[in-house]
Amino acid sequence: MKREYAYFVYILASKRNGTLYVGVTSDLYGRMSEHRDGLIPGFTQRYGVKTLVYFEEHDDVGEAIRREKRIKRWRRAWKIALIEGGNPGWRDLWLDLTA
């Protein structure tokens, strides 16, 4: 059976070990375009948080929202460990999505 929807939990950073933002979306490409172009007023725009350093895909929207809320409550060190577990150089993963 073909999956109709995917949901993404993602982490943006202003720079390596900089300000972090955790979000959830069903359109990672579209949401990243909005963040990068500064179209979403608020935290990410104010602090220049635009680098996609981590994301994970979920089949269920409820699961994705629970995961986002869980990660948001984590200590900063745990978020950094999550990022560095899959992206030790804090490379901008947006480049992979647009390649």
Image (cartoon, rainbow, N blue to C red):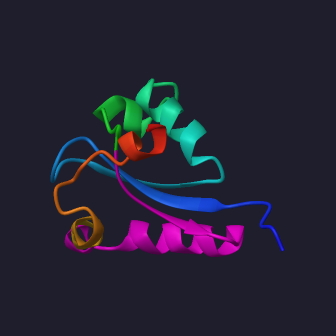
Locate residue 29 relative to residue 70 in the image: left or right.
right
Q: Identify the residue at horizontal 70%, vertical 67% (top origin).
A: 61
Picture quadrant of residue 42: top left
Number of numbered discs overlaid on the protein picture? 0
Q: Identify the residue at horizontal 30%, vertical 32% (top origin).
A: 48
Which of 91/69 is in front? Answer: 91
Q: Residue 17: image x %, image y %?
A: 15, 53
Q: Residue 52: image x %, image y %?
A: 36, 47
User: Which residue appears farthest toward the front when viewing the image?
Assistant: 99
Quadrant in which the N terminus appears: bottom right
Magenta residues (range)? 52-78
From what the image shows, is residue 99 above or below residue 5? above
Q: Residue 34: image x %, image y %?
A: 52, 31
Q: Identify the residue at horizontal 29%, vertical 68% (top origin).
A: 86
User: Which residue appears farthest toward the right when viewing the image?
Assistant: 1
From what the image shows, is residue 32 above or below residue 63? above
Q: Is 77 a magenta residue?
A: yes
Q: Residue 94: image x %, image y %?
A: 40, 42
Picture quadrant of residue 47: top left
Which of 5/37 is in front? Answer: 5
Locate residue 19 relative to residue 69 in the image: left or right.
left
Quadrant in which the C terminus appears: top left
From what the image shows, is residue 93 above or below residue 42? below
Q: Is 53 a magenta residue?
A: yes
